[in-house]
Amino acid sequence: MTDAATYRIRASFTATTITVYQAYPAHIGLPAARDGRFPETWQRDRMTWIKPSFLWMMYRCGWATNDGQETVLAIEMSRAGFAWALSHACLSHYKPGLHADRATWKRQLKQAAARVQWDPERDVHMRPLPHRSLQLGLAGEAARRYADEWTLAITDITPCVHRIHNLLREGNGTKAEQLLPAEAPYPVEDHLLAHLRS
């Protein structure tokens, strides 16, 4: 598999939005879904990680069973904001050849408004797949703009998450897969990812 195929964003998207996922405790997730924006208790000065992959989010939150991750949100954010974050991101680990040296990478990472890491994508049974899933960490200006400008809609999808998980526990993987969000390779200009492929 080529680097371009391995490190390719897969997501649900429209002409103007991309859906990303996050999981929160109820006191943050429920007001966010109700009001369509993050509540005042959501800390804009901390790094927040967004995930375009539904199944990676399920792997991370344990199908909404992990402590503090009981409410799963599908967030529609602007594609323009997503592109801005990618263009201002730094890879979360040092890669010789991509970065001039480790000191340069550390300096870039410290100054970057966003950071990217790639982890093995998962299938519905949480087994690793050969291609990677993007995690995008937003800090500083990027986190504030995500909360106040780029987020266009927030939906609590926890009931759907529980339904899929229950089907899997019942051994009905085929029906569970039918309920997964449709994801496809996300159209992004190569220069936005060239400095982020690990």
Image (tube, rainbow, N blue to C red):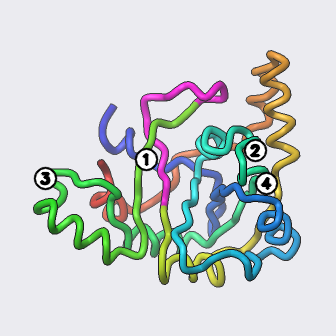
Q: Which mark is residue 8?
A: 1
Residue highlighted by disc 2: 64
Q: Which mark is residue 71?
A: 4
Separation of disc 3 and disc 1 at Cα? 20 Å
Sequence order check: which comes first, mark 4 or mark 2? 2
Quadrant where the image shows the N terminus: top left
Q: Amino acid at mark 2?
A: Ala
Disc 3 vs disc 1: which is toward the camera?
Answer: 3
Tag 3 secondary structure: loop
Residue in front for this viewpoint, 29 or 136 = 29
Q: Which mark is residue 183?
A: none
Separation of disc 4 and disc 3 at Cα? 40 Å
Graded by Cα atoms within 10 Å as few (under 14), some (14 to 19) or many (20 or more), the crowding at tag 1 reads: many
Graded by Cα atoms within 10 Å as few (under 14), some (14 to 19) or many (20 or more), the crowding at tag 4 reads: many
Q: Amino acid at mark 3?
A: Gly
Tag 4 secondary structure: strand
Residue 159 placement (x, y as % from top left): 88, 46
Tag 1 secondary structure: loop
Sequence order check: which comes first, mark 2 or mark 1? 1
Graded by Cα atoms within 10 Å as few (under 14), some (14 to 19) or many (20 or more), the crowding at tag 3 reads: few
Sequence order check: which comes first, mark 3 or mark 1? 1
Residue highlighted by disc 3: 97
Is 163 colored magenta in this rendering? no
Q: Which residues are magenta?
A: 123-136
